[in-house]
Every structure is written in structure tokens, then in C-alpha cells.
Image (cartoon, rainbow, N blue to C red):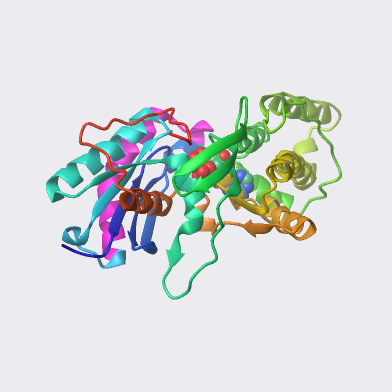
Amino acid sequence: MNKDNIILGIESSCDDTSAAIIKNGVILSNVTAGQEVHQKYGGVVPELASRAHQQNIVPVIDLALKNAKIELSDLSAIAFTKGPGLLGSLLVGTSFAKSLSLGLDIPLVGVNHMKGHILAHFIQEEGFEKEVPKFPFICLTVSGGHTQIVKVLSPLRMEVLGETMDDAAGEAFDKAAKLMGLPYPGGPLIDKYAQLGDKDRFSFTFPRTEEFSYSFSGLKTQFMNFLKKGLKTDENFIKDNLEDICASYQSHIVNYLFQKLKKAAFSENINQIAIAGGVSANSYLRSELKRLGEIHGWSTFIPKFEYCTDNAGMIAITGYYQLLEGDVSMQNVIPNARMKVDE
Ligand code: KG4
Ligand code: ZN
């Protein structure tokens, strides 16, 4: 038997079809196909997402194998996203992974997508050893579907300290972008315009929420009223002030995220602080984490861009840790659209 652990990771929880190969914790390839079909609808359309996954999954896996110079017969296990996510999307990856593991007679490993975002910090690249967070560490996971402060006790043991009670931080970005007429997903565009704007020009408020929990749904209404008010006196209000609006709105969200994250770090007395998920690609969030880390003496961990948004590298690395601990799935495994990070 092959003594190397070579894992094929498959990610299909939302609107990215991705495949990656990880050999003994080192990434050999990571291929992602996005889905432009959703742009004109201003959000992900579940039925269209699952159809696009069906079209993309074979070529994406094929390319991941080719880029890694790995044959199907070299694989030790197939890791796939079991949840959370859109059920129709998850079903495509799950069914494909099951068939492949059956055909190759190798283990099948169902992976939690939220654990994957966090364990993306442990992906090693060929040629140098990257510094990784020491356990226990705190991770702020911010994506299009989740906003959580997680205490990470070991690769597979995680505890949610606090989370959003309604919308996710990514949704707060995307919904505001949609109100300004920007295409989906608007988060990266807000980030882009914000880099040229004045973050102190406009201000917003947040509701009071319990200790480490967040709430973003009220911000959307507040932002809509802010735009309406501006447009009443100046029909070009958005166009003429886009950069300042984006910078002020972005800094408001980032400050709110850190307000709770700081509280959690102090109360847990933990100085290893990481960020993860699609919104961790945000340039202001990244620079603020570094700045706060210097002030508070934290070791900070920021994922490489390609491992922030949904990707199969993070699924393959989580599958690798699960395989080491014998945490594998049976052929009757089913996707879990509402899977919690501690499941
Ligand atoms: O983790 P992810 O790829 O998918 C989910 O699991 O949800 O996160 C996608 C989210 C979207 O809301 C997108 O707008 C946001 O991440 N995002 C950003 C940036 N890049 C991606 N938000 C703000 N600034 C960015 N640079
Ligand atoms: Zn995600």
C-alpha cells in the first residue's frame, strides 16, 4: 500500500466547483471554477448552482489531477464537503465523491465546510514550512453564509464562542453592493472602491448584541435609508461618493467584527488569532488584524487569498487530518445543509 497520504478534496457547497490534491499536508493543486450565471440575479440561484456543478465537476477534478501529476490510482482517500451549504450543490459533490471512492475502493471522508475554512491555515506549500497557529487559537470565520468566533482546540475539535444572529458579514457586503447597483458578489468591489475612499466620511450604527454575537440585518435597512436620503438631494449621490461610501461602510463592518473578536481574545486569554472565510480576503480586515496584533501582542494568521474564498484545498487538508484520526464516512453518508462547525 502507498505510504503517502494523497487526498483528493472536492468542494461544491455553494457556487464554486473546486478540486484539490494534498499530499501529506502539502498542496499540489487547487482548481476552482466559479459560476458567472448568478451575476445577473444579484445572488446565488440554487437550482442553477447545482446544474453548473454537474457540468464543472469532471473537468475541474481532471485538471486538479493533471496539475498535481497524480493518477486516480495514486489517491489514498476522497474528501468532500458534507455541509453546510445548498443541498442541491452539496449533493453533486457528495454523489461524485461516493462513486469515486467506491470505484477506487478507497476511504471516503465527509468534511465540514466551516472547519475547512479554519484548517486552510494548515495547508503547506512545497519548498517552505509555513508557520501555523498553535492550539488553542481563536478564529473569526467570516463568509457569505457565516460569521463566527470559534475557539479551535485541535484540528478537529472546535467550539463556537459567538456568531451572527441573522445575516453574515459577507451578506452585509453583498446586499449593500446590490443596493448601490454593483454586481454579485459585491464584497470584493466594495473593497476595491474603499481603497480610494475616506473611511471617516459617513458613519453607521450597530445594535447591541450579547457578548460575542453579531447582528447585521438592521445594517442593511440603515444603509438603504442612508442611500435614499442621499439620493433625495442629489441623484448622483452614489456615483459621486462611491469610494467614500464603500470605505465608511467597510470600516464600520470591520470595526464591529474586531470589537467582538477582541473581547473574545481577552476573555479566553488567547493570543493566537486567525481569520478565515471569503470576507478574510478583505484588505482592510487583513491590515486591521495585523495592526491590532501588534498593539495587543497577538500572533496573527491571515490565509493566502486563494484559501480565503471557497476552495477544495481547505477540504483536502481537513480530510487529511480526519483520515489521520480514522474519522471516515460510510457509503450511506448524506449531505447536511445545516451542519454546525462542532459536528
Ligand atoms: O467563503 P466564501 O467564498 O463562500 C461562503 O462560504 O459563503 O465567501 C463568500 C463571501 C461573499 O459574501 C463575498 O462578497 C465575500 O466573501 N468576499 C469579500 C471579499 N472577497 C470575498 N468581502 C469583502 N471584501 C473582499 N475582498
Ligand atoms: Zn465558504
**277 lies above or below 66:** above
Q: Is residue 145 left or right of residue 9?
A: right
Residue 185, visible in the rendered structure = no
Which residue is painted at 81% across and 30% down in the image? 205
> Is 308 drawn above or below residue 127 in the view shown?
above
Q: Position of residue 238 (x, y in %)?
A: 76, 38
Number of labelled discs? 0
**Residue 259 place in picture, x, y as percent:** 76, 40
Quadrant of the frame with the C terminus: top left
Question: Measuring 24% from the left and 64% from the top, which residue is drawn there?
Answer: 70
Q: Position of residue 338 (x, y in %)?
A: 44, 27
Image quadrant holding the N terminus, namely: bottom left
Front-lying residue, 202 or 144: 144
Q: Is residue 93 magenta?
A: no
User: What segment carries the magenta color?
Assistant: 40-66
Residue 54 lies within the magenta run: yes
Residue at 31% in and 65% down: 67
Foreground pick, 47 / 318: 318
Q: Nearer the viewer, residue 222 or 237?
A: 222
Q: Is residue 124 left or right of residue 291?
A: left
Residue 34: image x %, image y %?
Answer: 42, 47
Is residue 152 in view from this perspective? yes
Identify the image quadrant of residue 240. top right
Taken as a whole, is the magenta stretch helix, strand or loop? helix
Q: Residue 165 vs residue 228: left or right?
A: left
Q: Nearer the viewer, residue 325 or 90?
A: 325
